[in-house]
Image (tube, rainbow, N blue to C red):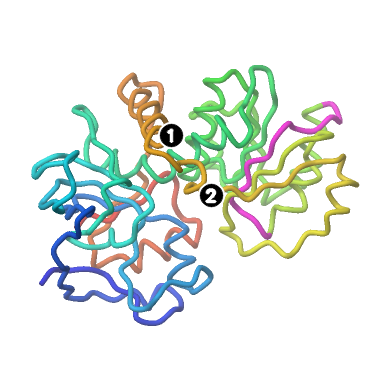
Amino acid sequence: MLTAVQVRRTGGPEVLEPAEVELSAPGPREVLVNVAAAGVNYIDTYQRAGIYPVELPFTPGMEGAGTVAAVGSEVGEFAVGDRVGWNGSPGGYAQQALVPAHLLVRVPDGISDETAAATLLQGVTAHYLVASTHPVAEGETILVHAAAGGVGLLLIQLAKARGARVIGTVSTAEKERLAIEAGADEVIRYDQVDFAGVVRELTGGEGVAVVYDGVGKTTVDGSLASLRPRGLLALFGASSGPVPPIDPQRLNKAGSVYLTRPTSADYTRTREELDWRVRELFEAVQAGSLNIRIGGRYPLADARQAHEDLQGRRTTGKLLLLP
């Protein structure tokens, strides 16, 4: 028996309950991981609340890092004692997790378990957004919402490395400072002003090439209004709530703009693509050109508090549970 956090009914953070869970032996293509650190992400809150339906009961946590404890009969690429991380498989809020082998990546020397767990889900998201969803080009101006959040800080750094001008939005003076430290060229307090109007002023009326919007309901209208003709709105999350249906005619009126709702699974469909994204992220961390900010560390028993802090927008950077 092992300690885990389970969701037996959907709802608010109060439905996160400690539990004794017994895992089965790894299947043929599964790996049992001793979890050293698990990432806390908005997708966990969506599953907990029932916005993304998951069969009950379940153990949340789509991302983590640790050490291989056992491998399935058909797993040859990993061995007991290997340091590994993953993104895209549930069960991280526990002392041990069963993870499909194809989702695991090796954690290199020089990268701590905490850093690995803080990098994979949000790092891969930031990587595919700037490298693939809209390949950011030198000299482009882009807009990043929640710029001091876990993905936001990574987006700033990765986009600046590609030569972009980055405008960020934040809600507090402390978050403004963090976004500037990460490299943002201009930061807008969207709790105080109409950010779309400021974006137009900063771009001489043109608008930005792409808006990376993980906030959703409260920002989507302003995001569309911030785009240049044929710009792209990459709506990759909904921390403020689900976005209502959008009439395609709004895209026409906004300047023949594009709207996409990307997800990590579609940008890591092959082992080669996953390894490419993770390799570039880890190499940047090791080189010191990508800073992974860990904004909070919690024991498993405090998973509820971690969710409350995340959804209350009281945090910056990445939150971790440490089993």
For marks 2 and 1, give the one nearer the viewer.
1
Q: Is residue 266 above or below residue 131?
A: below
Q: Residue tagged by mark 2?
A: 263
- Label drawn at residue 90: none
Spot occupied by residue 240 in the image (x, y as percentages of width and height): 60, 61
Q: CA distance from mark 2 to mark 1?
A: 14 Å
- Residue sitting at x 51%, y 46%: 266
Instruction: Name the residue type under label 2.
Output: Thr
**Residue located at (13% from left, 63% from top):** 25
User: Residue placed at 14% from the left, 47% from the top?
Assistant: 68
| Circle 2/circle 1 CB separation < 8 Å | no
Q: Amino acid at mark 1?
A: Glu
Q: Nearer the viewer, residue 112 or 281?
A: 281
Task: Say which residue label 1 marks.
Answer: 273
How packed is label 2: few (under 14 Cα within 10 Å), some, or many (20 or more)?
some
Q: Position of residue 262 (x, y in %)?
A: 58, 47
Residue range highlighted in magenta: 204-217
Q: Is residue 270 above or below residue 38?
A: above
> Is residue 208 part of the magenta span, yes or no?
yes
